[in-house]
Image: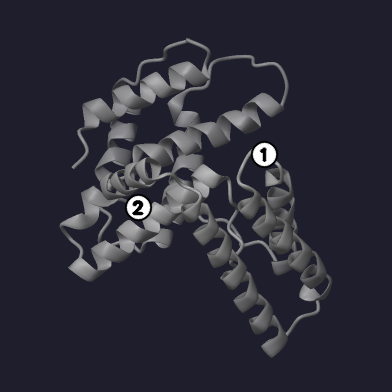
Amino acid sequence: MIDASEYCRELETYLCRKNEGHLIRIVGPVFEQVCGWAASGVPLTIAFRGIDQYCERYYAKGPRRRPVRIEFCEADILELFDDWRRAVGVTQTDAEGEAGPRHDRATLPAHMDRAIARLTTLRGNGRSAAFDASIDAAVREMDVARARAKQARGEDRAALIARLAAIDRSLLDAGVEGLSPDRRAALRQEADAEIAPFAARMAPEARERAAQAAFERLVRDAAGLPVIAFD
């Protein structure tokens, strides 16, 4: 179990940096609220990403009017936690709290548009030539496939979705290959720490799958890769 007091201190420190040094203590009802996240097993890395996500939207609206409070970030944090649980295979039985709010899934064409846009921004960002070549090939193929995504039905749609999954797997493998041994080991340790609150309630095979899925999610984040697969 994550220590709730330490969990709150970590979030206070992280949010303080996002607020340019303005510290807002997590106390009272908000402390109980955040302790609920800890009890549910929300990894700190997920909570940090939720804070980042909220702050990006907040700052995009114009000059900052007031410091961001942790409770403002709850919807983002819980939604990301819900996505994380599904990605690593942690079930509602494994988790002790409720999942975050779910949002309607994007259409296949919209999903592809976002993925192409994200991949395009990754080109030439100091990564290896092999990784850039993989991204270029993925963007070219998806650009062509995008034209038929809206009308795709039945077997054609299933084949397109299967191909997106294969592209996703290929890019993720390239991301793993691009890691140094030390960085790879560090991400493995971080993945093990993320699933630790649930590990005791999981069968060995499920725990191994969850650790691998958590590792791959961390690799995806480190490489800046969007999710190409569509389910």
Q: Residue furthest left?
A: 200
Q: Compare marks 2 and 1 and give the one earlier in the sequence.
A: 2
Task: Give the amino acid type for the residue marked by disc 1 in the picture.
Answer: Asn
Residue on which the image places disc 2: 98
Above or below for 79 versus 213: above
Task: Give the amino acid type for the residue marked by disc 2 in the picture.
Answer: Glu
User: Which one is closest to the eye, mark 2 or mark 1?
Assistant: 1
Horizontal side of 197 relative to 65 (left or right) equals left
Which residue is pictured at 15% across the width and 57% down the height?
A: 200
Q: Secondary structure at mark 1?
A: loop
Above or below for 92 versus 11: below
Which residue is pictured at 56% across the width and 36% down the height?
A: 53
Residue 125 disc label: 1
Among the 4 quarters of the image, the one containing residue 203: bottom left
Please tell me how crowded label 1 is: few (under 14), some (14-19), or many (20+) other residues with Cα within 10 Å. few
Among the 4 quarters of the image, the one containing residue 155: bottom right
Q: Secondary structure at mark 2?
A: loop
Q: Residue furthest bottom?
A: 155
Looking at the image, can residue 150 be seen? Answer: no
Say if mark 2 contacts mark 1, CB within 8 Å.
no
Which residue is pictured at 44% across the width and 30% down the height?
A: 71
| Quarter placement of the C terminus | bottom right
The residues tagged by marks 2 and 1 sit, at their Cα atoms, a distance apart of 38 Å
Relative depth, front residue between 224 and 93? 224
Above or below for 164 versus 60: below
Task: List x then y, in percent, for residue 226.
Answer: 60, 53
Task: List x then y, in percent, for residue 5.
Answer: 23, 26
Horizontal side of 91 relative to 218 (left or right) equals left
